[in-house]
Amino acid sequence: MTTIPKRYLVTSALPYANGLKHIGHLAGAYIPADIYVRYLKAQKRDVVYVCGSDEHGTAIPIQATKEGTTAQAIIDKYHPIMEQNFRDLGIEFDIYHRTSSPLHHETAQEFFTALNSKGDLEIKESEQYFDEEANAFLADRYIKGTCPNCGFESAYGDQCEKCGKSLSPDELINPVSTLSGKTPVKKKTKHWYLPLDKHEAFLREWILTEHAGDWRANVLGQCKSWIDGGLQPRAVTRDLDWGVKVPLPDADGKVLYVWFDAPIGYISATKQWALDNGKDWKPYWEDQDTKLVHFVGKDNIVFHCIIFPVMLKLHGNILPANVPANEFMNLEGEKMSTSRNWKLEMQDYIDDFVNKENGGTQMADALRYYLTQIAPETKDSEFTWKGFQDANNSELVSIFGNFINRSMVLMHKLCKGKVPKLHEEALGELDRNVIGEIRAVKEKVELLLEQFKFREALFEVINLARTGNQYMQKKEPWIVAKQTGEDGQPVAEAQASIDNTLHICLQLCANLGILVNPFLPFTAKKICHMLKVVDKMLEWENAGSLKLLSVGYSLRPPELLFRKIEDAEISYQVDKLHAAAEQVKNQQTEINMEENTKTETAPVKPEIVFDDFAKIDLRVGKIVAAEKVEKADKLLKLSVDLGFETRTIVSGIAMHFKPEEIVGRQVTVVVNLAPRKMRGIESNGMILLAEDASGKLHFIHPEETINPGAGVS
RNA sequence: GGCGAGGUAGCUCAGCUGGUUAGAGCAUCGGAUUCAUAACCCGAAGGUCGGCAGUUCAAGUCUGCUCCUCGCUACCA
């Protein structure tokens, strides 16, 4: 075992404050972190668990515009709800902060200034392309044009895909904005870049060598993919009015890019926590003896393993010891999706289960249980309502809850409601085995949690309850109790056996409380209550002990820890899920139709004269051959018979049509369009297609088959 | 197309550096039992380890090819 670090700083990905979060997020970044933190705290280790709302970025002002409100109103709406949702589900942050706070702005600005003044950022002052129609500066990738090196006409502003040469947008001939299709104008601007490319050697060594043994395979693989793909300098600032202002005199209208300020939110949250608790935040981010662990979903790997570590290193902070990223969680056979409304929001679960007559905190633990059991630790996993019901009913209720209940009930019936004595002399092999098992499980769970194997750790805990059931079954105290003497009471030998059995079962219950506490905290507290012990018993060092409950102490009457979930509740949820998705689908169709109408009535393009139109030579053609273009998912290479000749035309329709289906079809072709090379094939013309509301493409062709080459006007 | 992660019993997943009859939990079926939320306990059945070829005395485990899923990325309208 490695030595224990002096302190821990644990983070969960900052949820983006543009809407409610679903159980996929919960299972990916919050529940595992919460389990880990609760375990560390039970170990009495020095640990701070920080999180908060991520409130910057373009999506929030865009959504505000859509909802006819302000960005501030959006974040003020979602921040408190998200915080409450986490609390209701037992996610216990030491602080849930927000990136809109002044402290965060200060912290992020200080961070930027520190890097900038050390010369760690590259400054590029330039005449940058500006799209007047979209009223925005254009990132390199949003500009296309002709490559000065090879003449490829569709080169990006940062790199030519054809010849591989790195470019700057200025070098492009005939630049075009991909936002509006217009020619952008030059406007002076200046931006700061984080030169990730300069840190490639460090990243390679640190991740792929030093952490080859202790980081998850999916994480290492992702990182290797990124590093091998070549790291690029990344813009730290952007022209936007929502976010952390760039703290320099000549940077009006510029803010820090959200990817830069968001992870700094972990630091500002730590600072706020320190202020609130009279602590010093610095060691948590500066002392090498602090273990920093980031819990994130797989979409966040690159930020937490590549970009943020580079920032931390430059700034003189510690690096994460591990980033145990989870994969994604599907729901009832499909990806969770906010836009398609295929999801289970925390809020909905809380409303339907936790805040119900027959719900309460036990239902929060039930969800925590299932989400941990199916956590996507190594691959995408699947939430099904039936699976949730099964896990609850046959494991939590039948195995775990039942063991504790029957122990309590038997103790009340056979031991007068008191913790019975342990008769050492009467201990048998069965008894000793169980006692040994309790200690063994403690060690197993520890080892698994330290390795972030939450699923397996939880299994070991439930398995201990299973062991308890087996033990009780073999000892069958209810049968032994029938060996009565003349007074109707069990004979001394029988009572000793009963006492030992229940003494051990009750101590086992107490141990289950300790071991289950990181996973199901509400349940652990209820166990303490029933056993009339203080919550301090839950400290991890007590696990494995057979002296948690004092002999002769009278205990409370048993209460059921978990209730069964009925079939009707499950079918209600499944129906609700489908209905919600259906509703959105219908709405979307309506919106699409509306938008369709809108585009028809939308302002038409500037007027042209007949001669302009006459410049376009449209002909009817017939597809005589079609094949997929190698190394391109969307391109088809078509041979089109135009009567006077047969041409090769490359068209991006491979996702819509199969090559064999379209051979023989008539199409309309722009025949005098300048040739253009795509994926190395010269395309001589363009096929006309109409796109319907759902995005499906349709060929434009004469109603009846006519001679190829016929003119269209 | 490139890169990454996966494809193992009905379901959710273990299987490290190749080595006896491929494991667990749940579900299913059978039995036993009644202290317990018809719960528990015992037992059984259930897998061509995505497919094909190869290396090896021996492959789920190594190599090549191939199919499928997910993610990143590229190509396009």
Image: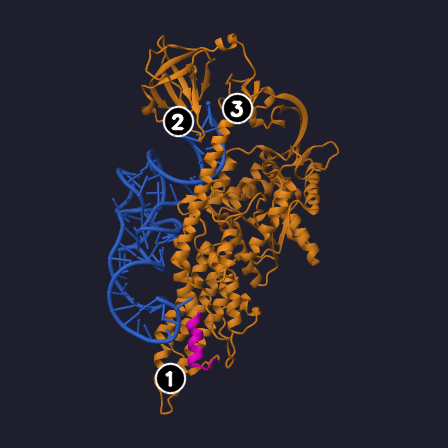
Chain colours: A orange, B blue
**Secondary structure of residue under mark 3:** helix
Would you name the residue on which mark 3 appears? A601
Q: Position of residue A174 (x, y in %)?
A: 57, 17
Marks 2 and 3, Cα distance to the nearest angstrom? 30 Å
**Secondary structure of residue under mark 2:** loop
Which amino acid is tagged 3? Answer: Thr
Who's the residue at 40% across and 16% down the image? Answer: A668
How many discs appear?
A: 3
Who's the residue at 48% across and 55% down the image? Answer: A352
Would you name the residue on which mark 2 appears? A654
Classify residue A710 as left or right of residue A95: left
| The stretch drawn in magenta includes residue A622 | no
**Secondary structure of residue under mark 1:** helix
Q: Looking at the image, is mark 2 or mark 3 earlier in the sequence?
A: 3
Q: Main secondary structure of the magenta part?
A: helix
Q: Are marks 1 and 3 on the same chain?
A: yes
> Compared to A479, does A273 lie above or below?
above
- The quarter in which the C terminus of chain A is drawn is top left
- Pointer 1: residues within 10 angstroms few (<14), some, or many (20+)? some
| The stretch drawn in magenta includes residue A409 | yes
Q: Which residues are magenta?
A: A404-417
Please tell me whether mark 2 or mark 3 is closer to you in this view: 3
Of residue A149 and residue A248, the one placed in the foreground of this image is A248
Would you name the residue on which mark 1 appears? A494
Q: Position of residue A228 (x, y in %)?
A: 50, 35
Q: Looking at the image, is mark 1 or mark 3 earlier in the sequence?
A: 1
